[in-house]
Image (tube, rainbow, N blue to C red):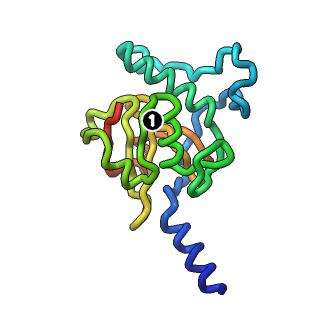
Amino acid sequence: MSSRLLIVVMWVLISACGVVKKGTIPWEEREEKKTNPSENATDKPAMIAISPVAKELSKDEQKLRIKLDEAFNDWKGVPYLLGGTGYDGVDCSGFLQAVFADYFEVELPRVTLDQMKVGKSVKKKDIRIGDLVFFRTGKKTLHAGVMINGQQFMHASTSSGVMISALQERYWAEAYLTTRRVL
């Protein structure tokens, strides 16, 4: 029985969404996410300050950014849970599936490998807000996130839960695999 448990544990480690290495920096501190979104429904949600780069966005891109800001405020710090899809815990592909369904009304497949097949391919130099970015974080391990501007992406990390990281950080730059556009 212990060998079966070991096999299950090894499978979970190998198939996890991704691993965040030292150097990943969390996004600036925000108001704690509301555990019940219907609470204080008349209150304006805390918004992520739009960076100077974002101010140059088109109207459509600004709308995307506002929705991504809302998603981050709602999901920030939700812990990583392999196979998770909700506020109790979420993995990277489940996080993307929930965000795109709830904020953009776009259905994504549940599994990272299948998510890499939707939309159209985008060259790294042409990445823009809302694009899906994918990484190879191990021999058989993939990870996914969504770009919030031309340099940062939002994702569910195994070490810090839902957070924002920089695409040009050495770990992510070396693990970068591809980008897909679905919006």
Can residue 29 be spotted in the picture? yes
Q: Is residue 98 toward the left or the right of residue 179 in the image?
A: right
Relative image position of residue 169 (x, y in whole percent): 44, 45
At x 56%, y 30%, the residue is: 71
Percent of width and height locating residue 144: 44, 48
Q: Which quadrant is the C terminus positioned in?
A: top left
Identify the image quadrant of residue 119: top left
The residue at which mark 1 appears reads as 152
Residue closer to the observer: 78 or 119? 119
Q: Which of the 4 image quadrants contains residue 48? A: top right
Residue at coordinates 52% horizontally, 71% vertically from top-left? 11
Residue at horizontal 46 percent and vertical 50 percent from the top? 110
**Quadrant the N terminus occupies:** bottom right
Q: Nearer the viewer, residue 152 or 146?
A: 146
At x 50%, y 38%, the residue is: 154
- Of helix, strand and loop, which one carries label 1? strand
The correct choice, above or below, for 120 with respect to 103 in the image is below
Which of the 4 image quadrants contains residue 44? top right
Q: Is residue 19 above or below residue 90?
A: below
Q: Position of residue 118 (x, y in %)?
A: 32, 44
- Number of marks in the image? 1
Q: Tag 1: residue type?
A: Gln
The percent position of residue 103, horizontal first and vertical second, equals: 50, 29
Can the viewer see residue 175 in this picture?
no
Crowdedness of circle 1 by 10 Å Cα count: few (<14), some, many (20+)? some
